[in-house]
Amino acid sequence: MKNKTPSLRSSLGRVRGLGSAKGGTEHWWLQRLTALALIPLTLYVLNGFFTYVVFGNYSGAVYWLHSPFSATAVILLLAVGFHHAASGVQVVIEDYVHCECAKLFGVITVKFLATAFAVLGILATLKILFGA
């Protein structure tokens, strides 16, 4: 027997299968996946940081970052970490800022700063990796 209750969603919304939040599930899953990826990356980079930088010196850190595997881990940590942080702050802004102009400005600013800092960190890592 078919359900006879009327739907509050539009025809287009029913066809696309989108709820009231449009695509919140995808954002939620991406936040969880980036958090999961950050666990081994953070552990590896912290291990190298303490081994070669804290208990070593600058030349030890340069030696560690000359390894393509270590440099790749640092680059991935920067990219995934800043993406994860920007996504989290975006959710907070969207949930708690009620002025649409301030919300748009906040989200754009967070995305811009996260991208800028990630690129700066990646360029610094590549500079050390290739010895420039």
Image (tube, rainbow, N blue to C red):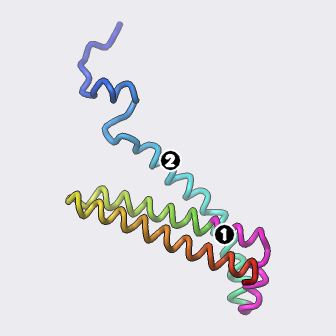
Q: Is residue 44 above or below residue 65?
A: above
Q: Which type of secondary structure does the marked residue at label 1 adopt?
A: helix
The residue at 23%/61% (across/down) is 101
Q: Is residue 23 above or below residue 18?
A: below
Q: Which type of secondary structure does the marked residue at label 2 adopt?
A: helix
Mark 1 closeness class: few <14, some 14–19, many ≥20 residues within 10 Å: few
The residue at 76%/87% (across/down) is 60
22 on left or right of 27:
left
Residue found at the far bottom of this picture: 57
Q: Which residue is mark 1?
A: 43
Q: Which residues are magenta?
A: 56-76
Q: CA distance from mark 2 to mark 1?
A: 22 Å
Amino acid on which the number 1 mark rests in the picture? Leu
Residue 99 lies in quadrant = bottom left
Amino acid on which the number 2 mark rests in the picture? Trp
57 on left or right of 110:
right
Residue 103 lies in quadrant = bottom left
- The C terminus is located in which quarter? bottom right
Q: Which residue is mark 2?
A: 29
Q: Position of residue 8 (x, y in %)?
A: 24, 27
Residue found at the far front of this picture: 132
- The N terminus is located in which quarter? top left
